[in-house]
Image (cartoon, grey):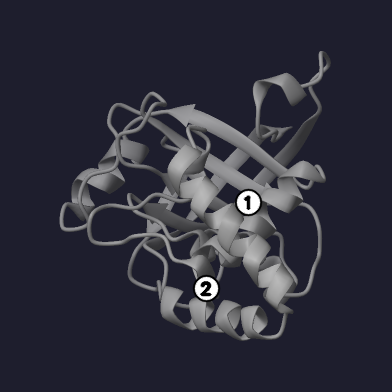
Amino acid sequence: MITLGIDNTFGSVILEEIAKIGFSEIDDFEQFKLFKAFNNFKNENKNPLINILCQYDSKSKMTIEDFIWLTKVINLIEDGHIWMSMLSVDNYAFPDKELKKNLENITSRHRNISIDTKNKHNSDGLYQFEGNLAFRRLYLTEDKIPSELETMMLKDFSGTIEFGTQNASKTAMSLFGSNITGDESVLLRVPYKSELPPVIAFLHCDKKLNL
């Protein structure tokens, strides 16, 4: 029997306030570099991986504070600390009000995944995965992928699940959740339609770090 994980995520408003405090404590030049990187990201980013890490719609635009959280995740990817595994599903995420369809989209194809939406807090739910699943070290671009892929096997794990739109701050919080509980946690992302085919993505951070 697997012990279901704990939803220890904060809401995006609190997380953006944390980033705002950190932003106010750096010097003007560092603030300028962040704003420049933020504007370049908004105007030039075409990486399909970003829709796994975070996804926005017309009602939820990325802020500079949210971008600060995304840079933390990107830095961890570049340092080799983020691992990912993807499984196929029939559909992209449905709107939040169609929760039953979102759940069936996963459990109908993957019966070893159980989902609990009653004990969630700031995520869309908690899940548990029974069995073994191979993860591969995540890279930002194809040119950085080595000829011999590194893999990690996780068994009987759990974590939070997020459907559709997702602030980068909440992705970071879910990935860093093991620092709060002391348990290994794996974020399960189900994005809206994107450049990728319909998939669910498991994301795991192997580094302990301070928020």
Q: Nearer the viewer, residue 86 or 128?
A: 86
Whichever of labels 1 and 2 marks the residue nearer the N terminus, that label is 2
Q: Which label belongs to residue 9?
A: 2
Q: Residue furthest top?
A: 147
What mark, if any, has residue 138 been given in the picture? none
> In which quarter of the view is residue 116 placed?
bottom left
Circle 1: residue type = Phe
Locate the C terminus by quadrant: bottom right
Q: Which residue is drawn at 63% across and 51% down?
A: 157
Query: Horizontal placement of 32 versus 81: left or right?
Result: left
In this rendering, the answer to whether 172 lies above or below 48 is below
Q: Which amino acid does label 2 sit on?
A: Thr
Secondary structure, mark 2, is: loop
Label 2 Cα crowd, 10 Å radius (few <14 / some 14-19 / many 20+): many
The structure residue drawn at horizontal position 34% and vertical position 64%, both measured from the top left corner, is 117
Q: Mark 1 points at which residue?
A: 157
Snapshot quadrant of residue 198: top left
